């Protein structure tokens, strides 16, 4: 089972599996881009894996480690943060252009049961929150076995 992203959606929409084919991911992105623009900042997420681990990277520039909260509950990983606009305003400045925006966000990932939740590690550095999610032994690829023919 792959990592699955949960998004706030209408009941008739399904939860996307982020490891689906490229075509499905592209369709999913196009369908939800407008929802994202209406609701505010949603950080980008990269998900990859090797034989031993899943890797999740969340782009959260402008936040500090203290702004970010990570929770795990029943194989659901929730990453959220809040930064109030007044925390970043400089009182003495008059802006001629202001494009930086801050606020709160929440991203939720449904983890497969093959993740060793007690061994998950997280590190925040240079605006990227990185997770290493070790796989249980049964999720790791096994070498092919030869079957004897009688």
Image: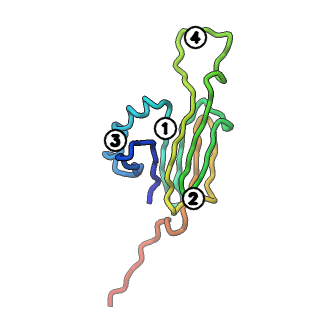
- Residue at the location (47% across, 70% down)? 142
Residue 43 horizontal/vertical position (percent)? 51, 36
Disc number placed over residue 134 in the picture, else none: 2
Residue 56 horizontal/vertical position (percent)? 53, 47
- Residue at the location (49% across, 54% down)? 49
Closer to the N terminus: mark 4 or mark 3?
3
Q: Quadrant of residue 101?
A: top right
State the separation of the CA atoms marked 1 and 4. 27 Å
State the separation of the CA atoms marked 3 and 2. 28 Å
Residue marked by disc 3:
26
Q: Nearer the viewer, residue 64 or 86?
A: 86
State the separation of the CA atoms marked 4 and 2. 46 Å
Q: Nearer the viewer, residue 124 or 40?
A: 40
Q: Are marks 4 and 2 in contact (CB under 8 Å)?
A: no
Left/right placement of residue 85 relative to residue 25 reads right
State the separation of the CA atoms marked 2 and 1. 22 Å
In the image, residue 27 sits, relative to residue 137, either above or below, namely: above
Q: Nearer the viewer, mark 4 or mark 2?
A: 4
Closer to the N terminus: mark 3 or mark 2?
3
Residue marked by disc 4:
95
Residue marked by disc 1:
44
């Amino acid at each position: 089972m792959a990592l699955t992203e949960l998004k706030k959606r209408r009941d008739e929409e399904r939860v996307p599996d982020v490891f689906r084919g490229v075509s499905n991911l592209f369709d999913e992105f196009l369908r939800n881009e407008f929802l994202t623009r209406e609701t505010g900042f949603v950080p980008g997420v990269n998900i990859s894996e090797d034989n031993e681990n899943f890797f999740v990277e969340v782009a959260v520039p402008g936040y500090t480690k203290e702004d970010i909260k990570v929770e795990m509950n029943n194989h659901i990983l929730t990453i959220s943060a809040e930064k109030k606009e007044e925390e970043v305003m400089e009182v003495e400045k008059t802006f001629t252009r202001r494009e930086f925006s801050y606020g709160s966000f929440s991203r939720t990932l449904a983890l497969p049961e093959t993740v060793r939740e007690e061994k998950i590690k997280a590190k925040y550095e240079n605006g990227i929150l990185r997770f290493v999610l070790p796989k249980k032994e049964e999720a790791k690829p096994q070498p092919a076995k030869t079957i004897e023919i009688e």
